[in-house]
């Protein structure tokens, strides 16, 4: 409901979007734990696409937009274009998500203050809003501020899983007990009836007007869901298929469009709630949609008593948490790469000043431009095997590591985001081995990007968590400074970063001595691979 409020449409359409969209998505997705539902960013772009439409045409446009988004995602999936997501850089997505979070906060201030601002963009509306602060409705403001405090307090307690719903529930109970006529409720702006969504047909005449926005929403939905399969892997280590996930999201939107649903996609937050709640298979998502259908069918009209200021408070807390979560990453990008920082800032400003749809296309073009400039060669990964007389044989890297062994990896080529995804797939898998050391030789690298740094951070975490070790050899002064500025040097440990020397193989041999010594200390307690 809160996400539908972002899009400035009847909150009932937000509820409808959690029904068939989620059920169809859970039935067909290759990522069995992924929940396909509304997201804040998708709702924000949807609202922007429908901004100049009113009345019945706006509602027809909403369902037509959902259908178009689904068809585009289906086409991308059928043509096996699952890899397209890797061509939108991390810095661009960071700028976009930060802008979306800020727009969500700014867009809800009117409900918190009880003031209707005017203006053509968020800057004008925010200025108009703050210039009229003296006219704010005090009961609305106090209830909204109280809801924010309640949600934050619950997020710091054992009931943090239920903090959002408890904040809304307490605000609704309060407004029922204490009559405050000036506080607007959901029922004041929309009729929420008991029952399931009726059948809706798209308005084909609106397709030309909505096509560009639909493409932007489709790309955003696919990009947002890109990290879900890695963050929440399938039980049993069964790998997900990005193209099949495209098809799943497309099919869920196509079906949902005929039953009054908004454009939806893989939701990282909803999937996280699903997993934390104990989900073990795709049936958790299916049951989620069924239960929502039952609740809305029997007691949907109870939603009318929810104060708009409480829903706005929830979104303000959500947007603020996103900004707080993204801030360290934004600082990291700024410290590591000025080129990536420029892409992040341009995307951010375009979203704020122009529109979110334009920001998506701008971000895609920036990502491709930066890739063309940077990706002169593809990444190459090979294994160096020590032999006598201080030489090394170079061969293909192993598919997986072995217990009580040292694996030396040589990386060549560019370290830009699309190449890093390819490189990540080639790294040897841990697969239950322990007391192994991976040495990555980075001699000759003058700098590294934030995406490659994240790869090193994640691989180091995986190795350490499973009882193994990562050592980096041949690190020049510039790269070492990047490690220090980003804080990575503290995570991996100074002793595991071997600086480059004038002698070609000296740092590599020092790393090899360190690795063999560490393995030898623990070897007696480790059972070798069979």
Image (tube, rainbow, N blue to C red):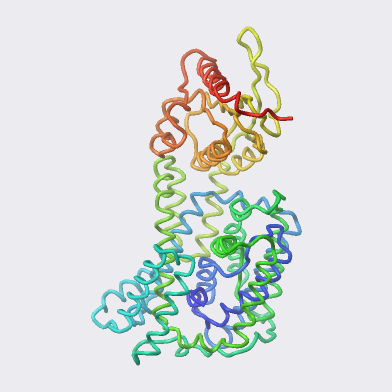
Q: Residue furthest right?
A: 78
Side (left or right) of 449 relative to 171: right
Q: Residue furthest left?
A: 134
Q: Residue 53 appears at what percent x and percent y?
A: 53, 81
Q: Residue 310 appears at what percent x and percent y?
A: 40, 78
Please give the name of the residue rendered at 55% of the width and 40% of the height, measured from the top-left corner.
Answer: 465
- Establish if 21 lies above or below 408: below
The answer to which image quadrant residue 222 occupies is: bottom right
Please give the name of the residue rendered at 59% of the width and 57% of the height, measured from the top-left corner.
Answer: 223
Observer-nearest of 495 and 10: 495
Query: Quarter of the image containing the C terminus?
Result: top right
Please give the name of the residue rendered at 40% of the width and 32% of the height, measured from the top-left corner.
Answer: 481
Observer-nearest of 105 and 493: 493
Please give the name of the residue rendered at 38% of the width and 87% of the height, measured from the top-left corner.
Answer: 175
The answer to which image quadrant residue 139 occupies is: bottom left
- Establish if 208 lies above or below 338: below
Q: Residue 8 appears at what percent x and percent y?
A: 49, 79
């Amino acid at each position: 409901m809160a996400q539908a409020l972002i899009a400035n449409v009847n909150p009932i359409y937000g509820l409808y979007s959690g029904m068939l969209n989620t059920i169809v998505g859970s039935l067909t997705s290759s990522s069995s734990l992924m929940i396909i539902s509304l997201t804040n960013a998708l709702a924000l772009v949807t609202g922007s696409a429908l901004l100049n439409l009113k009345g019945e045409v706006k509602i027809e446009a909403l369902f037509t937009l959902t259908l178009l988004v689904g068809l585009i995602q289906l086409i991308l999936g059928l043509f096996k274009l699952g890899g397209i997501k890797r061509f939108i850089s991390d810095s661009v997505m960071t700028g976009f998500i930060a802008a979306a979070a800020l727009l969500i906060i700014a867009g809800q201030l009117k409900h918190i203050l009880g003031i209707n601002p005017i203006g053509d963009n968020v800057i004008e509306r925010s200025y108009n809003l703050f210039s009229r602060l003296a006219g704010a409705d005090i009961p609305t403001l106090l209830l909204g501020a109280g809801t924010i405090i309640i949600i934050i307090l619950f997020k710091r307690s054992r009931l943090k899983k239920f903090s959002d719903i408890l904040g809304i529930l307490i605000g609704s109970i309060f407004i029922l007990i204490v009559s405050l006529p000036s506080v607007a409720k959901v029922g004041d702006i929309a009729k929420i009836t008991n029952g399931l969504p009726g059948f809706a047909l798209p308005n084909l005449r609106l397709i030309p007007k909505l096509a560009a926005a639909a493409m932007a929403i489709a790309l955003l939905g696919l990009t947002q869901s890109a990290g879900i399969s890695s963050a929440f892997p399938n039980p049993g280590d069964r790998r997900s298929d990005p193209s099949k996930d495209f098809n799943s999201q497309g099919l869920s939107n196509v079906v949902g469009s005929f039953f009054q649903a908004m454009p939806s996609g893989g939701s990282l937050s909803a999937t996280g709630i699903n997993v934390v709640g104990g989900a073990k298979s795709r049936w958790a998502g299916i049951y989620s949609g069924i239960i929502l259908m039952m609740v809305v069918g029997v007691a949907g009209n109870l939603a009318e008593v929810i104060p708009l200021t409480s829903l706005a408070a929830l979104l303000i807390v959500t947007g603020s948490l996103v900004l707080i979560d993204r801030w360290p990453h934004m600082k990291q990008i700024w410290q590591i790469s000025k080129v990536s920082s420029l892409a992040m800032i341009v995307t951010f400003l375009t979203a704020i000043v122009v529109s979110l749809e334009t920001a998506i296309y701008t971000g895609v073009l920036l990502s491709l431009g930066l890739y063309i400039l940077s990706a002169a060669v593809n990444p190459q990964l090979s294994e160096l095997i020590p032999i006598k007389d201080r030489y090394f044989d170079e061969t293909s890297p192993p598919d997986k590591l072995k217990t009580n062994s040292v694996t030396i990896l040589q990386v060549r080529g560019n370290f830009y985001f699309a190449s890093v995804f390819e490189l990540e797939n080639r790294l040897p898998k841990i697969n239950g081995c322990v007391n192994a050391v991976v040495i990555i030789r980075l001699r000759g690298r003058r700098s590294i990007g934030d995406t490659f740094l994240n790869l090193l951070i994640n691989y180091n975490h995986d190795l350490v968590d499973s009882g193994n070790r990562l050592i980096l050899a041949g690190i020049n002064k510039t790269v070492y400074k990047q490690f220090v500025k980003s804080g990575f040097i503290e995570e991996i440990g100074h002793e595991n970063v071997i600086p480059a020397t004038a002698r070609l193989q000296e740092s590599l041999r020092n790393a090899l001595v360190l690795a063999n010594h560490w393995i030898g200390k623990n070897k007696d307690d480790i059972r070798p691979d069979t």
